[in-house]
Each structure stands twice: as structure tokens, then as C-alpha cells.
Amino acid sequence: MSNKMGGSFLAHRTPQVANLERRLFLKRGLSVGALALLAGCELTDAESVQKVLWAMSGWNDRVQDWLFDPSRLAPEFPESRITRPFPFNGYYSESEVRVIDGTDYKLELGGMIRDAKPWRLPELYALPQVSQVTRHICVEGWSAIGKWSGVRFSDFLQRVGADTTAKYVGFQCADDYSTSIDMATALHPQTLLALRFADEILPPKYGFPMKLRMPTKLGFKNPKHIAAIFVTNEYPGGYWEDKGYNWFSGS
Amino acid sequence: MAADIKELVHPLVVRVTHWINVVAVLLMIASGWRIYNADPIFDFSFPDELTLGGWLAGALQWHFAAMWLLVLNGLVYVCYGILSGHFRRKLLPISPVAVLRDVRDALRGRLAHDDLSVYNAAQRAAYLALIVALVVMVLSGLAIWKPVQLYWLAMPMGDYEGARLLHFFAMVAVVLIVIVHVIMVMLVPRTFPTMFTGRIRRAS
């Protein structure tokens, strides 16, 4: 019905209208082509596009925070599924792994934490330990299954009197790495202050003396060689996050 | 005066969502290839010149921004297609025999395109396949993004690694269908302006 009406209306169009239509068509065709071209090259470096992309990443942080179920557990696997050898990854190569002396190691605490005294390694080893065999997913796409043991991070935060209503937990590492996570993930039951890998004291390449292990976040969010932990309401960013990787990066 | 009637073959919603989809799919594929290159599943990489983002973090930013464009636009298209009867009228019915016949005719260059307002069986199959492939892309992409929170989606696909493979092969399907589609448009060029104007001239 409407088709017919449109058809009869158009049947009476004047040459001017036809001309206009042709020009409109060309214009539309050009703008689509231009968009496709720009998307590929020049626009990529434009500041405004960068702004939009960062804003979208921030929006995706909010969506992921909303999607995050604090009681949803990441799948755990039998030990037979462990990936051997477990891949090394970092912002430097394996030959540049920092070797940290465990005897004068001290874990510093800061920010919104009541009892911010530093922790020595034997004190950490003496705390109740739990284990998990979980999948580590790298932002690059690969994944590997490993076994980590250590202190449940929520227990540790409670023990030191951290303000768990704060927004962020930040990490400074002995290899000059840094990252930060949301409090909900910090309190997740599978978030571990890992002291062991495959039942052995964490070797240097996997983050001696300790790493934060979170099967609910991508690998780069799991800091190794942790030197200081702080609780804050101010967004701390991180080594890769400041360069453009998505901050929440939850699984 | 020879009156020619212009008949609407592509409704406005279909035209608009089609061109937005072109942009979204190009962005997703170009950035997706860059992401693939960070850790190739198979023994090859995509040429960097064909990718978007410059490096992994940039490609991920594009990918996770353009996904909203792809999904929201796709939802408008699919809802419209179902509720308006557009899918039922244009894509159905579809029989395997007719698809095989039309594909064979097309390969021999004998498939007639007399009436652009009616999709032949090969077109119906291709467009339906593209819709399905894009839906699989989105679902497997969500499973890769959220294998823990959306475990119910990831598990039937073989968990994270299975979903990752599925995402790759659905991309291959999308690229192949798009290539065939573009070739067909080049072989029957009068279909091209119709995707802008929505109308064909029909002698009355």
C-alpha cells in the first residue's frame, strides 16, 4: 500500500528531483567509502578517536564491574590438566627476570589499611594456605593451566584491617611493574596471594616471593614480585593499563 | 510519457543497518586480525597493513568499542527483520534443492536477476548464513571475553579454547560470505545503488 503510494509520488518527480536524488546517492556513497578508508588509517591516530576509544574502554570497565558476580567461581581442573612447562610472560624477557632476596624481603602495606606493618616471608608462609588449579588467560589469547597456593587475599585484607569499602587495591612490584584491581575482585574467594607454584616455593620466573593470582582476570592483571600493596579510592592505573590495555580485564 | 514506477525493495531500516554493519564488521575484522597476530592459533599471521589498532592494546580498544556498534545495530536489524516480517517475506521459504540449483546456475553465470525485489535461493542461503555466522561471532566473542561470568555460554563451545577456535572459524565464514557477496554485486552492478536508494525502477 505505502509502496504504491510512494511509487506514484515518485512517478511525478521532476528532473530537478531526479538530479537531487542522484547527487544525494553520490554523497552517501562517498561518505560510506570515506568512513571505511578513514577507519583504516588516518583516523586511528587522531586525538579525538583516541579519546573515544579510551572512553569506550572506561565504559567497558563499568559493564564488566556490573557483570562480575562475586560468588561465581572460575573453573578448577584436575592436576593432570596442568600445562607443562608453564609459559613465562612479562614485559621483559625470561633472561631478565629479577631475582629477589627472600631474607630481607618485606611486603609493605599502605593506604586505607589499619595495621600497616610490613610482613616478612616466614610470617606469610605461616598463614593458612589454600591451593587452586585454574586457567591463566593471557590478553594475547593463549591460555595455560597452573597450580598456585597461598593465602586467600580476602583473609589477608581482613587480617590487616583493610577498608574493604574502598574502591581499589593497588600493587607495586619489585620488577617496576604495577597494577590495580577493583575491591570486589580482591575479595573474590579464588583471589590468592600466591606463594607457591606447583607445590614449590614460587620460582623467580613466576614471581618470587609472591604474586597475586586471580583466575577471574587476564594474566597481566596478576602482578608478580609484589613489594607493596595499598588500598585507595583514587584510581591507581597500572603499567599496561596506562598504555591502553583495558583496566578491568575480567574473565 | 513512459511512466516508470519506483518500487521499494530495501526498506530504510535494512539499508541503514546494512551500511552500519559494513563499517562495524570491517572494524571488527581488521582489529580482530591484529589481536590474532599477538598469538596466532595457526601457522600464519595476517599482514599488518590489513589490520587496525597498530598494536595489541590499540586493536583491543577498537575491537571492544566496535563490538557495541555491531551488536546494537545487529539487534535493531534482527528485531526489525522478525517483527516486520521482513525475514519471513524475503528469506523464507528456503529449500536445499533450490539453493543447490541456484548456486549451480550462478556458477555457470546463468542465474537470472530479473526481479531485484525477490531474493533467489542462493541469496537467501547466503544472507541467512551471514546472519547465523555473525550471531556465532558475537556469542563466541562474549564467551572468550567472559569465560567465567558467562560460563554457561563458554562451556557448550568447549570452554575458553573451544570458543576461541569457534570465533576464528566464524570469522572465516563471515569473510568468505562477504567476498562472495561483493563479487556478486560487481557482477550485477545495478543492485548496488538500490542499497542506497532502496528502490528499483519498474516499467508499469
Image (spheres, rainbow, N blue to C red):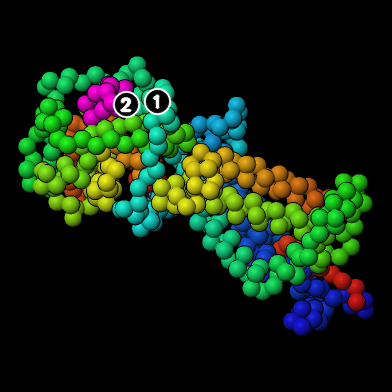
| Horizontal arrangement in the rendering, residue A120 relative to residue A23 (left or right) | left
- Figure check: B116 above or below B167: below
Tell me the residue that label 2 is attached to.
A198
Q: Disc 1 or disc 2, which is closer to the eye?
A: 2
Indicate the position of residue A2 as horizontal and vertical percent values. 74, 81
Q: Which mark is residue A70?
A: none
To which quarter of the image does residue B170 belong?
Answer: top right
Does B110 sit above or below residue B36? below
- Residue placed at 17% from the left, 44% from the top? A155
Using residue B141 as the reference point, say whether residue B87 is left or right of it: right
Residue at (18% x, 52% y) in the render: A164
Residue A8 visible at all: yes
Q: Which mark is residue A86?
A: 1
Q: Are marks 1 and 2 on the same chain?
A: yes
The local crowd at label 1, few if under 14, some if 14 to 19, many if 20 or more residues have their Cα within 10 Å, is some
- Specify which label sits upstream in the sequence, 1 or 2: 1
Task: Specify the quadrant that holds the C terminus of chain B.
Answer: bottom right
Q: Does residue A74 appear left or right of residue A45 in this picture?
A: left
Magenta range is A193-212
Marks 1 and 2, how far apart at CA: 10 Å
Q: Chain of mark 2?
A: A
Answer whether residue A58 is magenta in the image: no
Q: Position of residue A100 (x, y in %)?
A: 20, 21
Q: Give whichever of A39, A217 is nearer the camera.
A: A217
Contact, mark 1 vs mark 2 (Cβ under 8 Å): yes
Amino acid at pointer 1: Phe
